[in-house]
Structures are given as C-alpha cells and as structure tokens.
Amino acid sequence: MGLHHLPQEQLNIFFQMIYRILRPNGLFLFREHHARQELIPLLDVAHMVFNVVTGVDYESEINEIRAFRTIEDWRSCLRRAGFEDTFVYDEQEDDPTDDIMIIFRKPEQDNQITNIEWNENYQKIIANPESNYFRPCEWLVVRICMQFGQYLNH
C-alpha cells in the first residue's frame, strides 16, 4: 500500500509518528508513483486491474483512496514534516506507472528542519530491476501503513 492510499487529512499525523519512532539519522524509505497529470488515468486503471485480480470487492474499489501526487509534492510533504531529502532514489526501468523509491532521513538533531539545496548530482541506487532488492522495505512500509490505518479506525 502506498502513501497515496492513506486518508490525506491524516497524512501529517502518519509522518509525525514515523518521525517520532526513527532515531536521529534514521531512514524512511517509500515508493510512490510520479503522478503527473497525464499519468493519472493509467494509474487508476492499474489500481482497478490489481483490485480485480486480487479479488477486492466493488464497494472497496469505489471507496479506495487514490490521492496521487507528483514526486516533487511528496518530497515537499516530507520536508515540511522535518525530514531531510537524501536525493537517493531509484525507479524500476520500463515501469509504466513511474513507481519511484525515495529515501528521507530524520536529521541528526531532533526537531531540526534543514534547508535542502538543489543537488544536481543525484545518487542512484544500482539494482537489478528484476530482483527483489526493494521488496522487504516496500512491504515494511505496507505493514506500517496498514497498522496505522487500523489504529485510526479504532
């Protein structure tokens, strides 16, 4: 489950919880679609097909939250929450949904929000796209998001 599936009015609470439990210099990894306006119809179709294949009922499908944003918007959200942008990212080649993994860091000094200057020298994680290199981190985020959602519903 991506961050775009969380209730957006509670997104800042989620980021605060992640920030609170991370140690200084701790990393927060997440994957999100780079949801440019022209990509959103494809993302909707991809989510609908996934839901059909996995047996999601119609009621859940029509009520599913899909708050797609661009990567720049996600980066702004995380910086506002106090995280540092590491500018480390990766994207699986030939992924039509532009699903990008991004890494943010909790600053060394707690509650310190730093200004991040534009870094032209992006670092890129080198990984075989066919590998499961990112799966453990991705599923940890899924588990955390699901537990947070259950917490909010109780």
Image (cartoon, rainbow, N blue to C red):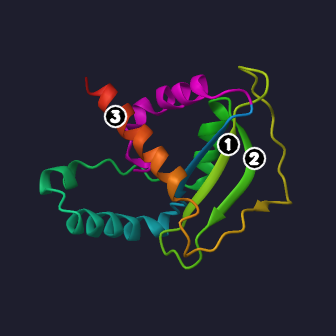
- Give the mark, 1 or 2, whose residue is nearer the N terminus: 2
Whether residue 66 can be seen here:
yes
Indicate which disc residue 86 carries.
2
- Note whether 49 is above or below 145 in the view shown: below
- Give yes or no for residue 18 being in the magenta stretch: yes
Q: Quadrant of the C terminus?
A: top left
Q: Amino acid at mark 2?
A: Thr
Q: Amino acid at mark 3?
A: Gly
- Give the mark, 1 or 3, whose residue is nearer the N terminus: 1
Magenta stretch? Answer: 1-24
Q: Is residue 59 left or right of residue 4?
A: left
CA gap between label 1 and label 3 equals: 22 Å
* Residue holding disc 3: 149
Residue displayed at 46% across by 34% down: 11
- Give yes or no for residue 39 being in the magenta stretch: no
> In terms of secondary structure, where does tag 3 sit?
helix
